[in-house]
Amino acid sequence: MARREHSAYELATKLTRRYRTAVVGSIVDELTENGELSDRRFTETLVRSRFNRGFGPIYISKELRLKGIEAQLAKECIGAFDGEWQARAKEVLEKKRGQYNYTFEEEADGGNNDDGAKALNEKLARFLFGRGYPSDIVYRLFR
């Protein structure tokens, strides 16, 4: 049986579909007191998972907000990776660039190579923005 961590908000939302709100509140409180439900543990797990999958801090922060995690807790857990976002963005960029290189080289059979490279870089930058990397990191990678 697969099991994952849940935030208190997420679990309460799921349980409210089947049970009364008063009952759900007491169950969530009890699980939290017993340490079986922890927003911090959930947040740390989600941040690590998304980081490893190549998502940036903006994307992760938004996802945490949607799952009912307090801004301060999200900031702390995302901040644990502060020195690593640039390197991770570079890894993601190189992997994605490798997927485009074969197509780019085949299409550049006599056309202006600078225009093609510029178009590819713009496409890759949009990809990184979509993955939730801040502009300062993205622009630093294309200097």
Image: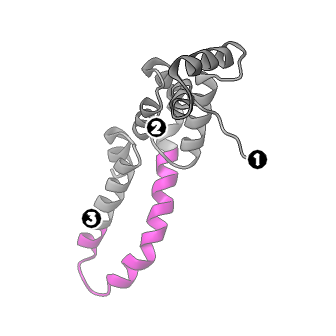
Q: Position of residue 125 (x, y in %)?
A: 33, 54
Q: Nearer the viewer, residue 83 or 38?
A: 38
The residue carrying mark 1 is 1
Find residue 118 and name its label. Answer: 3
| Camera-nearest label, 3 or 1 | 1
Q: Nearer the viewer, residue 102 or 70?
A: 70
Point out the stretch of residues depicted in magenta: 88-117
| Camera-nearest label, 2 or 1 | 1
3D distance between C-alphas at marks 3 and 2: 28 Å
Compared with 97, 26 (above or below) is above
For badge 3, the amino acid type reads: Lys
State the SS at label 2. Answer: helix
Residue 37: say if magenta: no
Mark 2 vs 1, N-terminal side: 1
3D distance between C-alphas at marks 2 and 1: 26 Å
| Image marks 2 and 1: residues in contact by CB distance under 8 Å | no
Q: Position of residue 36 (x, y in %)?
A: 71, 23
Q: Position of residue 135 (x, y in %)?
A: 31, 41
Q: Nearer the viewer, residue 20 or 26?
A: 20
